[in-house]
Image: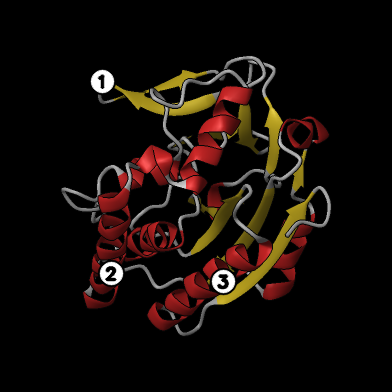
Amino acid sequence: MNAERLAEFLDHASIDPDVLELRPDYRVLLIAVSGIEPAPGDTHSEQLLRSAERRARRLLAERPAEQLPHVSAWREAYRAFGAKPQRTRNSLEALLRRVETGLPRVNRLTDIYNAISVQHLIPLGGEDLDHYVGPPRLARAIGTEPFGTVAGGEPIIEHPEVGEVVWRDDEGVTCRRWNWRQTTRTQLRDDTSAALFILDALAPCTDDAVRDAADDLLAHLVQASPNLIAARRLIAAAKSP
């Protein structure tokens, strides 16, 4: 996929107005990339993970994860659409709670974006772009959208709750509860060569902070895949800090 097609894909991404009514401070920076060179974790990704773990341990020595301002903001957002954040944690908090025993090691691509998420304290999702059907859209669910997942080792179809904030495409839900759990259909695989990265932000996170995280992510992706092609787009309700 060339740069023009990546940009066109992002041009069609959207946030439904009722989501922005729920949280007017919400912004998302979307990055679409192709030319990824799939690989298992390596020295580069391991160093990133260890650096992120060290930073997180320093922060968590001062206060628990749920009291960090960026985590607290997401807990409030979850409560606003009826989710219980102590039971369904946003992706950033879920990673922070794994720091004590070590962040997961999956493959080079996943390890890089998890490290950036923790390092910059931003929920960050990665999806296999080749398995998308139509553009990404953040919406409040009507409750009938299909969500493919696994239970008991077997593939199943679930449905979001009415009013739940979900990322979706033309085929169904790609991520439930804003940034809680991704569908198996678009999850990153060991052979993923094109991906969509979703960087979520709520105050006190600023646009500049989100852009810094995106720059950091892209720099490390290019280091791992020198022929990477990328496009990016920031979507917001209004001018933010």
* Residue drawn at x 48%, y 70% as measured from the top left: 217
Are the residues at dot 2 and dot 3 in contact (C-beta closer than 8 Å)? no
Quadrant the N terminus occupies: bottom right
First in sequence: mark 2 or mark 3? Answer: 2
Expressed as whole percent of the image width and height from the top left, the position of residue 110 reads 36, 58
**Does 38 sit left or right of 25 as displayed?**
left
First in sequence: mark 3 or mark 1? Answer: 1
Amino acid type of the residue tagged 1 in the rendering: Gly
Tell me, yes or no, if residue 35 can be seen here: no
How far apart, in angstroms, are the residues tagged by discs 2 and 1? 34 Å
Q: Residue at label 3?
A: 212
Q: Residue at label 2?
A: 51
* Residue drawn at x 54%, y 18% as measured from the top left: 159
How far apart, in angstroms, are the residues tagged by discs 2 and 3? 17 Å
* Residue drawn at x 79%, y 52% as measured from the top left: 12
Tag 3 secondary structure: helix
Are the residues at dot 3 and dot 1 in contact (C-beta closer than 8 Å)? no
Identify the mark at residue 152; answer none if there is no mark. Answer: 1
Amino acid type of the residue tagged 2 in the rendering: Ser
Quadrant the C terminus occupies: bottom right
User: What's the coloring here?
Assistant: secondary structure
Expressed as whole percent of the image width and height from the top left, the position of residue 141 reads 67, 23
**Does 110 sit left or right of 84 as displayed?**
left
First in sequence: mark 2 or mark 1? Answer: 2
